[in-house]
Amino acid sequence: MKKDPSIEDVKAAIAKVMHPAIDRTLMDLGMIRDIVLAENTASLTLVIPFPGIPILSFLEKSLKESVSPLGIDLKLNIAQMNQDEVQRFLAMEKEAWKGL
């Protein structure tokens, strides 16, 4: 019998999701918060540096696809980074930029 996915399974799957233009994971970039698992649904907050980022739907799709092999749905909340988080994000972006 297959065991139900744990919160660790969910975190491990999400931790592999890469940013498409920066050679870092979304987790490394500080873009993932508040991962919760309740029955067959995980939820998390995707924290973005600026409103209206053009890759938002791509990031949402990538995150949802990362947990689908676990047989769970993913609910995303979107929030905006504070100034310190944006500065950290931009520093990592500069260091690891690979372009689109």
Image (tube, rainbow, N blue to C red):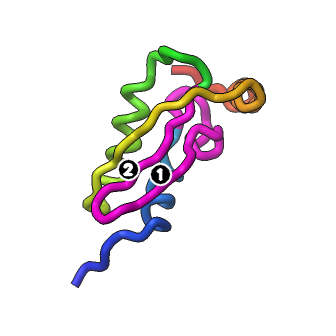
Q: Is 99 rendered above or below residue 9? A: above
Question: Label 2: which residue?
Answer: 66
Specify the quadrant of the image occupied by residue 6.
bottom left
On the picture, is 92 further left or further right than 56? right
Q: Is residue 25 magenta?
A: yes
Q: Quick one: label 2 or label 1, which is nearer the N terminus? A: 1
Instruction: Categorize mark 2 by other alpha carbons within 10 Å: few (<14), some (14-19), many (20+).
Output: many
Magenta region? 19-48
Return the residue nearer the eye: 87 or 77: 77
Q: Which residue is located at x 53 percent, y 31 percent? A: 79
Q: Which residue is located at x 49 percent, y 60 percent? A: 12
**Secondary structure type for disc 2:** helix
Residue 97: where, in percent of width, then height? 65, 26
Q: Which residue is located at x 44 percent, y 22 percent? A: 55
Number of labels in the image equals 2
**Secondary structure type for disc 1:** helix
For residue 44, the mark is none
Residue 86: where, in percent of width, then height? 70, 26
Q: Is 10 rendered above or below residue 83? A: below
Q: Is 86 rendered above or below residue 28? A: above
Indicate the amino acid at tag 1.
Answer: Ile
Report how far apart the C-alphas of labels 2 and 1 lie in the structure: 6 Å
Q: Which residue is located at x 47 percent, y 51 percent? A: 14
For residue 14, the mark is 1
Q: Are marks 2 and 1 in contact (CB under 8 Å)?
A: yes
